[in-house]
Image: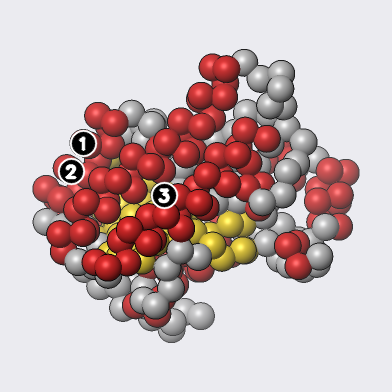
Amino acid sequence: MDNLSFNLQDKVFVVTGGSRGIGLEIANLLLAQQAKVVICGRKQEGLDAARQELNAGDRLKTVQAHVAKSEDVDRLFETTVKTFGSMDGLINNVGMNIVTGVVDADPGLWHKIIDSNLNGTYLCTRQAGQIMRDRKKGKIVSISSIAGRRSAPFMGIYGVAKAGIEMMTKVVAQELAPVNIQVNAVAPSMVRTKFSQPFWSNEEFYEQIVKAIPMGRIAEPTDVAWPVLFLCSEASDFMTGQTLMVDGGSSAI
């Protein structure tokens, strides 16, 4: 697949939560296609480490920002346009979960999970949509989850947020289709990242997870990043409002 080209040279993408895991791999693939990338994260040390690992020079910009804070989101997109002159796409990758039920969850915990996952996706989508609408072209891709379609113990609030992201994808896709902006999502099953490490690092629990995946393994970050790259490219110009399941066949059972 090294020779596969999606023709993204000099296109500008914002990747939220791009300092590690899936977001870092997405940024890496975009940069490999000669795109210009802005990544954001909450911790500066994480952004510094990502900059060193990606080693993309002036084609990479890092911005410390919390996507659930409107002032941070404003600064993220202002910095993007100021640095690169425009933007061609947004990848909403930020996600967080705290293991809890719904009924017994403290309301503050509900708001924290919803803010980071759903409200952050809304704030970034709103800004990107307004910028790209004036240019009459663009791509918005959000990272959902199989948890948004299949309830699971202790993933309830996270699942509600991801289900909201998938509906937002459909709604915004219809709003922006007349101005040639495609809005899609990718919904993976469990991915081998630090985010999900408490689950897959337990051998017994890992075996239970894999039993429900026909392909016999959990996803790697690249398994998610490649479909995202496709949705960022001209190859997906007639796709909008869709969620691609990247789950090793789990949803086919």
Tell me the element at label 1: helix
Q: Quadrant of the C terminus?
A: bottom right
Q: Residue at x 21, y 36 (%)?
A: 75
| Residue ID for mark 3 | 92
| Residue ID for mark 2 | 79
Residue 196 in the image: state x and y as whole percent: 65, 42
Image marks 3 and 2: residues in contact by CB distance under 8 Å: no
Q: Is residue 95 left or right of residue 44?
A: right
Q: Residue at x 22, y 44 (%)?
A: 77
How would you rate the neighbour count of disc 2 (Cα within 10 Å): few for under 14, some for 14-19, many for 20 or more? some
Tell me the element at label 3: strand
Could you say which disc has been placed on residue 3 in the image? Answer: none
Q: Amino acid at mark 1?
A: Arg
Q: Residue at x 88, y 44 (%)?
A: 204
Visible residue check, residue 251:
yes
User: Disc 3 and disc 2: Cα gap in Å?
Assistant: 17 Å
Closer to the chain start, of discs 1 and 3, is 1
Residue 201 in the image: state x and y as whole percent: 75, 42
Visible residue check, residue 56:
no
Relative to residue 160, is residue 239 depicted above or below? Answer: below
Front residue of 67/45: it is 67
Q: Is residue 62 left or right of residue 192?
A: left
| Residue ID for mark 1 | 75
Residue 48 in the image: state x and y as whole percent: 34, 39
Tell me the element at label 2: helix
Q: Amino acid at mark 2?
A: Thr
Relative to residue 209, is residue 229 depicted above or below? Answer: below
User: Disc 1 and disc 2: Cα gap in Å?
Assistant: 6 Å
Picture colour scheme: secondary structure
How would you rate the neighbour count of disc 1 (Cα within 10 Å): few for under 14, some for 14-19, many for 20 or more? few
